[in-house]
């Protein structure tokens, strides 16, 4: 089966600019996750969707980050305005149901804010 | 609060030697624990989970509730085991929380 697809793979922007990342989960996977991984750290969950509803967004910096999952399939994560500390890899992942099921990760979108 | 601690950022062993990657967790209930692995230029992927009690690629991990640990072990390391390893936990909030990761290097 096709894996989790993400784009763009790499992005360099200046601080205060905006950026958007796109994710297409594995077909049939109801749960979609966005993780932020800063260099040298483990992935940190930003937001978790179950179909098109938000299950958890407690660690999403809502003043600058937003995410949506229209029609319960694809998802976009937006950052506006970006800060230097947003430089990280943004990982999208999906699973069939609850988080206890195997979670499949995409290759990640590498963001550098200068 | 759920927390996962991997005390070693780097671990280097020789091929054929035993490997143990440490993981300690903090959670008051009964957690689900996992090890994820990321090989060079590959995606992060599940290696094993404690409820399966299985051995994957020669690796095993036992949940020790008394010591709140879930160490990953392999009796004889192979060069292809070199990778980044993450311990992760799911608690009551049904969200997967990762540790900081341990970079394992197997020397020939």
Image (tube, coloured by chain):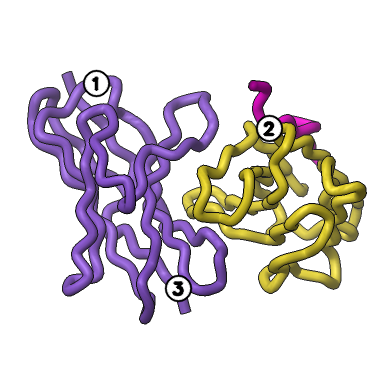
Chain colours: A yellow, B purple
Range shown magenta: A1-12
Residue in front for this viewpoint, B17 or B107: B17
Q: Residue at x 84, y 55 (%)?
A: A52
Residue B25 falls inside the magenta stretch: no
**In which chain is the residue bearing label 2?**
A
Q: CA distance from mark 3 to mark 2?
A: 27 Å
Direction from residue B26 to residue B45 in the image, left or right: right
Q: Nearer the viewer, mark 1 or mark 3?
A: 3
Residue B30, percent from left and from top: 36, 72
The mark nearer the N terminus, 1 or 3, is 3
Q: CA distance from mark 1 to mark 2?
A: 28 Å
**In which chain is the residue bearing label 1?**
B
- The residue at which mark 2 appears reads as A4
Residue A33, percent from left and from top: 68, 51
- The residue at which mark 1 appears reads as B79
Residue A102, percent from left and from top: 51, 43
């Amino acid at each position: 089966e096709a894996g989790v697809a993400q784009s763009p793979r790499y992005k360099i922007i200046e601080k205060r600019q905006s950026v958007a990342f796109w994710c297409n989960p594995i077909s049939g996977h109801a749960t979609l996750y966005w993780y932020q991984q800063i260099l040298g750290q483990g992935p940190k969950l930003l937001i978790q969707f179950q179909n098109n509803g938000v299950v958890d967004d407690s660690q999403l910096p809502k003043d600058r980050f937003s995410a949506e999952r229209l029609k319960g399939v694809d998802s976009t994560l937006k950052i506006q305005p970006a800060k230097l500390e947003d430089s990280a890899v943004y990982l999208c992942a999906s699973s069939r149901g609850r988080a206890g099921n195997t979670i499949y990760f995409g290759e990640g979108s590498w963001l550098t804010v200068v | 609060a759920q927390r996962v601690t991997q005390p070693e950022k780097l671990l280097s062993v020789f091929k054929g030697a035993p490997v143990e990657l440490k993981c300690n967790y903090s959670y008051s209930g009964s957690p689900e624990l996992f090890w994820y692995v990321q090989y060079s230029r590959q995606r992060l992927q599940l290696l094993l989970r404690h409820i399966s009690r299985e051995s994957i690629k020669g690796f095993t991990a036992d949940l020790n509730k008394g010591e709140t640990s879930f160490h990953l072990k392999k009796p004889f390391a192979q060069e292809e085991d070199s990778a980044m390893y993450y311990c992760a936990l799911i608690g009551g909030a049904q969200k997967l929380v990762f540790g900081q990761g341990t970079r394992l290097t197997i020397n020939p």
